[in-house]
Image: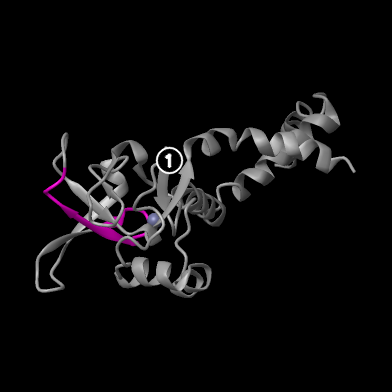
Amino acid sequence: MSKNILLLLSSVVVLLLSACIPPEPADSGADSSTTQAPSERSPKSPADDGTGEQTESQATTDNEEFVMRSDAELKAELSPLQYKVTQRKGTEPPFRNEYFDNKREGVYRCICCGLPLFDSQAKYESGTGWPSFYQPVAGKNVATEEDRTLFSIRTEVKCERCDAHLGHVFDDGPAPTGMRYCINSAALKFAEREAEAAAPETPDATADPTAEP
Ligand SMILES: [Zn+2]
């Protein structure tokens, strides 16, 4: 019986030795550290918190490069007339506004968010006293909505991006569309085409001399 026990013990010792020996001859420090490090990191990396936050933050930053300003911010930044027109669906007086007879070439952007809305190439003399266009720069940049104020049914024109009220659109315009976008100057910010094209160059030219001293 004692021999059997000895045999068992010896066999166990041999097994233990054989089990211990193979790993040891392999390059000692580097392998053990590299094998341990990934094993320690791997359970941490798939944490739900990290991945969830990353995907959410990436999605929001990609979709929301434009940040909608609050009513208080708009009221502070816009003139009283610009605020009344764009945020309260007001109407400026005809012929006494900035752009009704503006004949310069350029782009009219939303006064609230800067989205390009109308181009001077589609501007025409409507005789109404308001800036009039036969089409927007892109249909997707403006939204329309039925307006039942002033005892009539009109079609309101709004900025697609920030929902600012711009004016109204009627179907008595000239060719090629037959549409008349009657827009408040107070809802627009005009940028002359030469100024827009030269804008990226002038800051560089002026930046060098001013930056050095
Ligand atoms: Zn806008």
Locate the C terminus and report the quarter of the image it occupies.
top right
Disc 1 residue type (three-letter)? Arg
Q: Is mark 1 within 8 Å of ligand 1?
A: no
Residue 74 visible here: yes
Along the viewing direction, whichever of 8 and 161 lies nearer the viewer:
161
Name the residue tied to disc 1: 104
Percent of width and height locating residue 107? 41, 42
Q: Position of residue 108 (x, y in %)?
A: 40, 47
Quadrant hosting residue 91:
bottom left
For this rendering, which residue is in front, 49 or 165?
165
Where 70 sits versus 203, above or below? below
Of residues 72 and 190, which is closer to you in this image?
Answer: 190
Of the 4 image quadrants, the one containing the N terminus is: top right
The magenta stretch spans residue 167 = yes
Report the residue at 37% width, 72% height from top: 84
Residue 164 highlighted magenta (yes or no): yes
Tally the numbered discs.
1
Q: Is residue 47 above or below residue 194?
A: below
Q: Residue at x 10, y 65 (%)?
A: 153
Q: Which residues lie in the magenta part?
A: 157-173
Give the image location of residue 111, x and y in percent.
Answer: 44, 57
Measuring 48% from the left and 58% from the top, which residue is drawn there? 67
Element marked by disc 1? loop
Q: Position of residue 11 (x, y in %)?
A: 72, 33
Q: Quadrant of residue 105?
A: top left
Residue 28, relative to residue 170: is it above or below?
A: above
Q: Is residue 7 visible from the viewing direction of this image? A: no
Q: Is residue 64 left or right of residue 40?
A: left
- Name the quarter showing ligand 1: bottom left
